[in-house]
Amino acid sequence: MKSMTRVVLVTGASRGIGAATARAFAAAGASVVLVARDEQRLDAVRKEIAAAGGAAIAFPADVSEVAATEAMVGRAIAEFGRLDVAVNAAAAHGSRPRPLAETPPEEFEQALAVTVRGTYLSMRNEIPAMITAGGGVIVNVASTAGLRSISGLAGYVAAKRALIGLTEVAALDYAADGVRVNAIAPGPIHTEQLERAGAAAREHVRRTVPVHRLGTVDEVAATIRWMCGEDAAFVTGSTLVIDGGLLAGTPTFA
Ligand SMILES: NC(=O)c1ccc[n+]([C@@H]2O[C@H](COP(=O)([O-])OP(=O)(O)OC[C@H]3O[C@@H](n4cnc5c(N)ncnc54)[C@H](O)[C@@H]3O)[C@@H](O)[C@H]2O)c1
């Protein structure tokens, strides 16, 4: 068991699940590196963590860029001396669901660029730093959409499914080096996107979930923290579904 303060890097930390995860780790005493493209929102999360007595720095970066992913891990080490945990939550989803033939190539490519290439590049830099630190843990944020497809989301579904494969390969490649790599697959979580979609859309989604509610970002963050802790020491290469029963099947009794 490591006794020193853990250093945690979170991509996609400017909002939603990423921000909640960063807050949860900081509240538990970790030093946190916040990464996303939106500088202002990233800094707002940093200030919030600092106001609560936590240690965090903001590092605006585009994870689909080689140099940016090298620099983000470099910054973590320069600031906090090591890297123990990484949560790769950055993702791009298109502006709206649309049939495959109507999906602009740029939108499809962007989904793959951020989720697949971005997570590959992030792990490519995170893993060597973790090996230097004596081991580490990575959680990649996939989606139930990576396990059961959703129409109108060609890029998102393809990217999340690829991310699960990428997670498994990384877990196998570094299992003997003390680096655990897992994915989580959240179902519908109450985030800004669903907030913006409006009450009718949320109600429609809520009805599809066997427990009849949306998940919260704090529930996802708590699961990620568990995955990164000693209690999950034997868990690697897995994808944990957090979906209120959505993928289990079709409920008979409402
Ligand atoms: N919200 C849900 O219901 C839900 C369900 C399943 C999976 N997820 C996944 O959880 C993660 C977080 O989703 P969310 O809804 O909380 O937030 P979100 O999807 O609204 O935010 C994504 C984050 O990624 C960042 N980002 C986007 N492109 C980037 C890039 N090129 N480089 C660096 N950062 C970039 C954004 O700035 C933001 O911080 C995503 O991977 C998403 O696919 C969300």
Image (cartoon, rainbow, N blue to C red):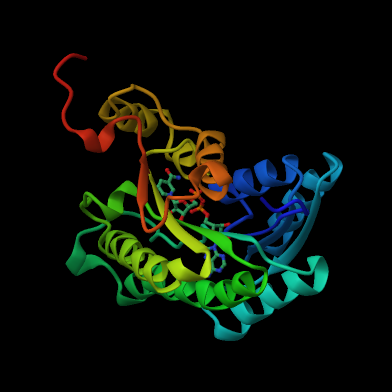
Q: Please identify the quarter of the rendering in which residue 107 is found.
A: bottom left
Pinpoint residue 214: horizontal percent, then vertical percent.
Answer: 41, 30
**Residue 114 appears in view:** no
Q: Judge whether 189 appears above or below 26 on screen.
A: above
Near-viewer residue (91 or 151) = 91
In the displayed structure image, the side of residue 202 where residue 204 appears, left or right: left
Q: Judge whether 106 appears above or below 57 on screen.
A: below
The residue positioned 52% from the left and 78% from the top of the image is 124
Pinpoint residue 55: horizontal percent, then vertical percent.
Answer: 81, 52
The residue positioned 55% from the left and 59% from the top of the image is 137
Q: Please identify the quarter of the rendering in which residue 66 is found.
A: bottom right
The residue positioned 33% from the left and 22% from the top of the image is 211
Pinpoint residue 11: horizontal percent, then vertical percent.
Answer: 58, 61
Marker count (numbered): 0
Task: Specify the farthest residue to the bottom.
Answer: 67
**Residue 15 appears in view:** yes
In the displayed structure image, the side of residue 177 where residue 168 appears, left or right: left
Task: Specify the farthest residue to the top.
Answer: 253
In the displayed structure image, the side of residue 18 where residue 238 appears, left or right: left
Near-viewer residue (181 or 43) = 181
The residue positioned 59% from the left and 65% from the top of the image is 135
Q: Is the C terminus in the top left, top right, bottom left or bottom right quadrant?
A: top left
Pinpoint residue 90: horizontal percent, then vertical percent.
Answer: 51, 61
